[in-house]
Image: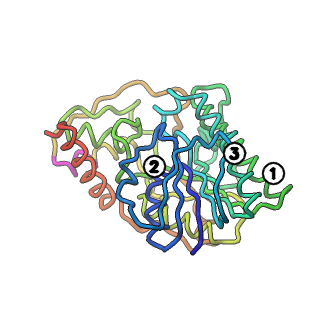
Amino acid sequence: MPRILITGAAGFIGSHLCDHFVAKGYEVIGMDNLLTGSIDNIAHLTAENFTFVKHDVTNYIFVEGPLDYILHFASPASPIDYLELPIQTLKVGALGTHKALGLAKEKQARLLLASTSEVYGDPLEHPQKETYWGNVNPIGPRGVYDEAKRFAEAMTMAYQRYHGVATRIVRIFNTYGPRMRLRDGRAVPAFGAQALRGEPISVFGDGRQTRSFCYVADLVDGIDRLLMSDYPDPVNLGNPHEMTILELAQSIVRLTGGASRITHGDLPVDDPKVRQPDISLARKVLGWDPKVPLEDGLAKTLDYFREVLDREGGAP
């Protein structure tokens, strides 16, 4: 039975990865300090092959026994989180990645780093290929996340080249699905919660900025393929279907059957104007393509948001 450590296990994507590898029969060790993750996301995992450890990965990581794989997903990952937790975001990207790589070296385990499309910043190349170096403001409010992930990638490649650690890097583009927090500041949960409550939907700017949305099950499949591949350099994973934020808001209003009007506010500082992955490399080396249509994924995600609002007594 392969053993895998997943940091950030109680987060949105981390918890879905726990589900995936438990179902595959791996022995899964989930680790999280619950700063932004929720134990509710993994409370259903009662199988004998799953263990949860509450731990801050910026401190020394101890895992007894052998390890085959490490998925390093610990980090605040939404605009609200990394604006409210700038120091913690920098520390987990730098110190947390260092500790995870040290553990991989000790255990001779393969490590996959969760990086992000934010390494491209407000891109001047469109769509974004892995060869693009990015357009990042290192001292802007988003820089704490962007540069933490850019440093994490540099550290990961250094351990690969200098210590011979087997590493993989996934650059994750906008992903959505059940277990997103309604108040994490990202477009899908923000618009979903507002529409389900019958509130106005708050769109930043004129809404013409673009994003590409990938359903979480597709992403998890791509991560597994990358982990098991022999490809050592960064790989984009995301859905290349590009749409405006205004179109997303209109889709959510339609799917909820509500009558929410759309309002417009100021754009956040350094908000990217375009964001679309070039996934040619993932198609070539992983045989991966996202499968879930946006409306199907949104329907499942909105069902989850309804359940959360019902529990909180906030549904209409």
Amino acid type at image mark 3: Ala
Question: What residue span does the magenta drawing correspond to?
Answer: 251-257
* Front tag of 2 and 1: 2
Q: Earlier in the sequence, mark 2 or mark 3?
A: 2
Query: Which residue in the structure is indicated by mark 2?
Result: 10
Q: Quadrant of residue 215?
A: bottom left
Amino acid type at image mark 2: Ala
Residue at (40, 54) in percent of width and height:
42
**Tag 3–tag 1 contact (CB < 8 Å):** no
Q: Earlier in the sequence, mark 2 or mark 1?
A: 2
Say what secondary structure mark 3 lies in: helix
Q: Is residue 168 left or right of residue 84?
A: right
State the separation of the CA atoms marked 2 and 3. Answer: 21 Å
Say what secondary structure mark 1 lies in: helix
Q: Is residue 193 left or right of residue 5?
A: left
Above or below, comparing residue 238 to residue 182 in the picture: below
Does the magenta segment cover residue 255? yes
| Image location (x, y in percent) of residue 53 | 52, 50
Colour pattern: rainbow
* Front tag of 2 and 3: 2
| Image location (x, y in percent) of residue 204 | 40, 31
Mark drawn on residue 158: 1
Q: Quadrant of residue 148?
A: top right
Residue at (64, 39) in percent of width and height:
58
Query: Which residue in the structure is indicated by mark 3?
Result: 152
Residue at (37, 42) in percent of width and height:
181
